[in-house]
Image (tube, coloured by chain):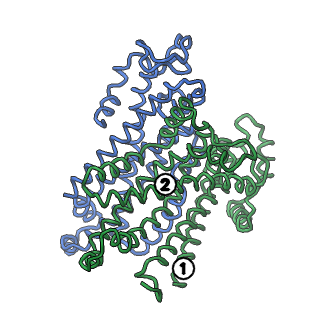
Chain colours: A blue, B green
C-alpha cells in the first residue's frame, strides 16, 4: 500500500487524466458525480477529483518526509549531545521539553503558522523542529545505554575527540533505534500535516492537497455531494495505515 | 507520600512557568508588530500605533510578560481582540462545552479500550489479538477529520441517524445533547482506543507472566478468580497513567473535531483565535490547555502512586 502511494507520488501527475490544477473551462462542470470521464467526479471548481487525489500523494509525502528528515537529523544530533554529556544540559533541556510538549502539536503548528502565514516550507520547519526534541529523547536513552559499554571507554582512553566518538563510534550502534523512530514519526507527520492543511494552516490554496480538498468540500455533504470528500479521505486512510503497518514490521524485524 | 506530591507539584509549576514563557514568545514575539498583524497591511501607521498603545504591545517585552502573567495568576487574561470580551469568560464557556465532548469520548473509550486490551492479552498471538492490536493501531493513525468525514457521510447524510453538527438547539435536554455529541466523539474514540488497549494488553501480559500469578494458579484458584483478583488489579495501573497522558492529545484532536462538527469548544475557539490573529485569546487559550495537561499528568502520577501497592504505605496490600 505504501509502495503504491510512493509510486503515485512520483508518477501520479503523469498518469493523471486531467490537469489537477484545473483549466478555466472546468468551471462549467462543477460538482459532477463520478462518471466514465471523471472516475471520482469533479470538485467545486470543476477539477477532476481523481487527478487531484493522485497529485495529492506527492504533496503529503514530500512535506511529511522533509519534516521528519529535518526532525531526525536535528534530533539525533541533540540526542547524541545530551546523552553523551548528560548532567545539567540534560536537566535543562528535559524541563523545556516538558513545557513544550504540554501543548498539542496541532496547536503549536497553528500558532507558528499564524505568525508565518500558511506555506509548505513553514509546515516542514515547524513539524521538524517539534519532532527534533521528541526524537532526541529516544536517541538520548539509546546513547545512555551505549555510553556504559567498553568500546566507548576504549575510544575515550585513545583520547579521541567527543564529536568523533559520538558520530563514528556510537551513532552506528544506535542507528536501528533511529530508523524505527523515523518511520513512526513519519506516520505521525502525515497525520499532523494533513490536519493542519484541513484547518487551513498548511498549504497555499490551489495546491492539490488532500486535507485542503476535504476542508473545501465538506460543506457540500448536506447536499449528498460526497465524492470530493470521500475519495481524498480514503486516500489518507490507506496511506497512513500502510505506513503504520510498515513501521510496525520494521520495528519487529529489528527486535528479532 | 506528601513529599512526593509536593515535589511533583513543584515540577509542574516550573514546567508551567516555562510554558508561559514559550507561549508568550510564540504569541507576542513571533508575529512581530501585533497591531499591524491585526489590522492588516492597508491600515494607516497611526491606527496601528494606536492599537498597539491600547493593547500595550508598544512596551518593553519583559514588562508585557510581567503584566500578562500577573493577570493570568489572578484569572485575568486580558480581552479578546476579535470578540471584544474578556478572554477568561470566552475560555470558560468553551471549556465547559469541550469537557462534555471529552467526557462522552472517555466514557466510551476507556471501558472499550481496557476490555479490548484484556481480550487481546488473554488470546495472545491468536487472530483476536492480531485484530485488536493491528486494527487499534491503524485506527490510531487515521486523522480525526478523515474518520469524522466518513462518519458524517454514512450516519448523518445517508442513514440520517445522527445530526451532522455537534451543537444542539439551545436549552435542549440531556438526551438531545448526548445525541449530538456521540458522532463527534467517535473519531476521538478511534484514535484513543489503540493506545489504551495496547497499554492494557502489555500490562495484562506482564502480570500473567509474573510470579504471583503463578503462585495463585498453583494454589489452585480458578482462572477467572486469578484474572480478576491478581492480574487486573496490577495490569490496570499503567492504563491510568496512559489515559491521563492522552488528555494532551485529546485537546489537539478537539481542534479538528470541533471545527469539523461546528462545535463551540476550546479547540474551535483556538482555531478562530489563530485565524483572526487574536493573540490575547490565543495566548490565554494555550496557557489554559497547557495547565489542563499538567494538572491531568499530576493527578495521574498521584493516583498511580496511591493505587500501586508497592508504593502505598500502611494499607492492606
Q: Secondary structure at mark 2?
A: helix
Quarter of the picture holding the C terminus of chain B: bottom left
Q: Residues within 10 Å of mark 2 (few under 14, many from 20)?
A: many
Query: Does residue B282 sit above or below A21 in this rendering?
Result: below
**Image quadrant in which you'd find residue B70:** bottom right
In the image, residue B134 above or below residue A8: below
Q: B283 or B270, which is in the foreground?
A: B270
Picture coordinates of residue A250 (x, y %)? 25, 50
**Is B26 on the left or on the right of A105, as rendered?**
right
Dot 1: few (<14), some (14–19), or many (≥20) neighbours within 10 Å? some
Which dot, 1 or 2, sits closer to the camera? 2
* Observer able to see residue A35: yes
What residue did someone put label 1 on?
B5
Query: Is residue B263 depicted above or below B280 in this figure?
Result: above
Specify whether A75 is left or right of B250: left
Callout 1: residue from which chain?
B
State whether residue A69 appears in this view: no
- Residue occupied by mark 2: B109
Chain identity of mark 2: B
Give the mark nearest the N terminus, 1 or 2: 1
Measured as percent of width and height from the top left, residue A232 is found at 45, 30
Q: Residue at x 60, y 62 (%)?
A: B292
Q: Residue placed at 47% from the left, 89% from the top?
A: B314
Q: Decide: is A7 above or below B253.
A: above
Amino acid at each position: 500500500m505504501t509502495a503504491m502511494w510512493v509510486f503515485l507520488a512520483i508518477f501520479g501527475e503523469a498518469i493523471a487524466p486531467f490537469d489537477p490544477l484545473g483549466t478555466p473551462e472546468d468551471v462549467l462542470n462543477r460538482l459532477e458525480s463520478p462518471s466514465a470521464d471523471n472516475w471520482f467526479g469533479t470538485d467545486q471548481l470543476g477539477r477532476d477529483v481523481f487527478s487531484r487525489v493522485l497529485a495529492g500523494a506527492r504533496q503529503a509525502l514530500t512535506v511529511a518526509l522533509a519534516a521528519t528528515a529535518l526532525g531526525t537529523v536535528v534530533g539525533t544530533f541533540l540526542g547524541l549531545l545530551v546523552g553523551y554529556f548528560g548532567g545539567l544540559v540534560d536537566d535543562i533541556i528535559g524541563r523545556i521539553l516538558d513545557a513544550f510538549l504540554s501543548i498539542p502539536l496541532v496547536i503549536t503548528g497553528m500558532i507558528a503558522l499564524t505568525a508565518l502565514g500558511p506555506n509548505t516550507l513553514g509546515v516542514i520547519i515547524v513539524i521538524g523542529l517539534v519532532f527534533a526534541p521528541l526524537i532526541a529523547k529516544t536517541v538520548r536513552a539509546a546513547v545512555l545505554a551505549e555510553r556504559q559499554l567498553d568500546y566507548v571507554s576504549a575510544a575515550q582512553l585513545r583520547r579521541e575527540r567527543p564529536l568523533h566518538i559520538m558520530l563514528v563510534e556510537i551513532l552506528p550502534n544506535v542507528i536501528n533505534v533511529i530508523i524505527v523512530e523515523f518511520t513512526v514519526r513519519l506516520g505521525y507527520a502525515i497525520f499532523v500535516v494533513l490536519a493542519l492543511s484541513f484547518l487551513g494552516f498548511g498549504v497555499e490554496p490551489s495546491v492539490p492537497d488532500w486535507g485542503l480538498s476535504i476542508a473545501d468540500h465538506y460543506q457540500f455533504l448536506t447536499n449528498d455531494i460526497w465524492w470530493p470528500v470521500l475519495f481524498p479521505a480514503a486516500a489518507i486512510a490507506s496511506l497512513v495505515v500502510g505506513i503504520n503497518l510498515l513501521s510496525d514490521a520494521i520495528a519487529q524485524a529489528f527486535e528479532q | 507520600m506528601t513529599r512526593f506530591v509536593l515535589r511533583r507539584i513543584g515540577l509542574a509549576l516550573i514546567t508551567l512557568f516555562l510554558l508561559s514563557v514559550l507561549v508568550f514568545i510564540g504569541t507576542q514575539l513571533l508575529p512581530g508588530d501585533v497591531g499591524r498583524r491585526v489590522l492588516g497591511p492597508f491600515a494607516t501607521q497611526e491606527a496601528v500605533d494606536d492599537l498597539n498603545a491600547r493593547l500595550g504591545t508598544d512596551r518593553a517585552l519583559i514588562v508585557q510578560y510581567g503584566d500578562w502573567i500577573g493577570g493570568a495568576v489572578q484569572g485575568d487574561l486580558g480581552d479578546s481582540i476579535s470578540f471584544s470580551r474578556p478572554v477568561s469568560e470566552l475560555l470558560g464557556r468553551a471549556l465547559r462545552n469541550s469537557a462534555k465532548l471529552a467526557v462522552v469520548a472517555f466514557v466510551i473509550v476507556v471501558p472499550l479500550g481496557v476490555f479490548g486490551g484484556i481480550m487481546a492479552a488473554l488470546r495472545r498471538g491468536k487472530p483476536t489479538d492480531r485484530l485488536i492490536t493491528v486494527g487499534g493501531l491503524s485506527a490510531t493513525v487515521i486523522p480525526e477529520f478523515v474518520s469524522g468525514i466518513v462518519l458524517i457521510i454514512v450516519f448523518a447524510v445517508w442513514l440520517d441517524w445522527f445530526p451532522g453538527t455537534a451543537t444542539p438547539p439551545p436549552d435542549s435536554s440531556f438526551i438531545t445533547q448526548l445525541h449530538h455529541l456521540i458522532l463527534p466523539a467517535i473519531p476521538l474514540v478511534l484514535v484513543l482506543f489503540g493506545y489504551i488497549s495496547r497499554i492494557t494488553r502489555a500490562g495484562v501480559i506482564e502480570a500473567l507472566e509474573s510470579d504471583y500469578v503463578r503462585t495463585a494458579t498453583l494454589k489452585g484458584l480458578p482462572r477467572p478468580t486469578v484474572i480478576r483478583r491478581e492480574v487486573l488489579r496490577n495490569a490496570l495501573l499503567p492504563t491510568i497513567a496512559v489515559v491521563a497522558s492522552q488528555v494532551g492529545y485529546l485537546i489537539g484532536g478537539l481542534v479538528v473535531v470541533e471545527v469539523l462538527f461546528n462545535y463551540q469548544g476550546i479547540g474551535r475557539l483556538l482555531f478562530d483565535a489563530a485565524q483572526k490573529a487574536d493573540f490575547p485569546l490565543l495566548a490565554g487559550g494555550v496557557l489554559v490547555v497547557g495547565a489542563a495537561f499538567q494538572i491531568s499528568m499530576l493527578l495521574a502520577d498521584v493516583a498511580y502512586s496511591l493505587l500501586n501497592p508497592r508504593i502505598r504505605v500502611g494499607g492492606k496490600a
